[in-house]
Amino acid sequence: MMGHAELRHESVMPAEITRSLEPGPSAKFVDGTMGLGGHTELFLERVGASGTVIGLDRDASMLERAEARLSPYGDRLVAVHARIAYVADVIRGLALDPVDGVLFDLGLCSAQLDDPERGFSFGCDDSPLDMRMNRTHGETARELLERIELAELTDLLRRGDVPSTGRVAQTLLDARPLETVGDLKHALERLRLPRRRHHPATLVFQALRLHVNRELQEVELALEGALEILRPGGRLAVLSYHSGEDRRVKHFLAREARGCICPSDLPRCGCGRQPRVKILLRGEAPSPAEIARNPRARSARLRVAERV
């Protein structure tokens, strides 16, 4: 386990998030992806002693560390070990709905990326290929790669925007067993893939992580849950770091802002579906100064909508 000196994580776009969500005294806010609690603390400072912040995280170790770090805030923080897909169930179970704001930061916490036991990044060759956010449940990346077939792996990598998916998939299958980060990294190095905006290994690791944790499937469930618990005028903010996640957020919010889902050739609306949100921010990127200070923020995109 990491020591306290290692518990460093710089929250992404804190000024933009607080400006967009406008947390104020006595408000109720949800940080659906708590991590080490950087954004959570921003909310705690602003809602005051009479406000409440509910922090969720599927990673029990991150939740424990965040609770310890934020213990000075006392009862105004409610920490829950849960996945974002269940955000509505959690808030209703606590009898805290409706809420004033919800944040989903869909990226990994730096402490998770830097932990050699997790296998999330290719920085440590000896790390086991785990990649689970909840280490007590589900299939590891090693187990996935051991049993997966070519067609499924190719599709998995394609959804992760990995270039040359067929070649990559076949190479990984031929290199089995893949037990460690080093095994996976060295197999990819033999391919000599062209380096684009991201190192090819980064995209492969990200695609495997997204699949192991069912992250893309969770996003839309989480967005729907957030709209169910937001009060009218309440706001939803989503930070995405992967194009597949960002597309899901963009399309969901566009659909909910449009309301009607009737075919365009119908003379009048027959579904009666009304808009549920007003879009306030459409994929804002971090400032150059923030990216220079925190390079891990460079792929972030912030989308914000208001419940109507």
Image (cartoon, helix red, strand yellow):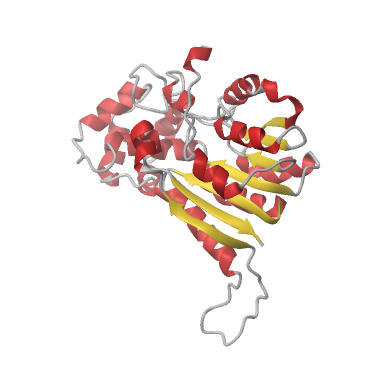
Where residue 67 appears, x then y in whole percent?
A: 65, 23
Residue 210, compared with residue 182, is above or below; it is: below
- Count how many numbered circles sit on residues in the image: 0
Closer to us: 147 or 14: 14
**Residue at 35% in and 19% down:** 124
Q: In which quarter of the image is the C terminus?
A: bottom right
Can I make out residue 88 in this image? Answer: yes
Residue 227, compared with residue 258, is above or below; it is: above
Can I make out residue 1 in this image? Answer: no
Where residue 237 appears, x then y in whole percent?
A: 56, 48
Where residue 60 appears, x then y in whole percent?
A: 61, 25
Q: Which residue occupies the extreme right position in the image?
A: 95
The quadrant in which residue 110 appears is top left
The quadrant in which residue 247 appears is bottom left
Closer to us: 123 or 39: 39
**Residue at 51% in and 29% down:** 132
**Residue at 61% in and 61% down:** 277
Closer to us: 305 or 132: 305
- Image position of 75 (left or right of 262): right
**Residue at 48% in and 48% down:** 302
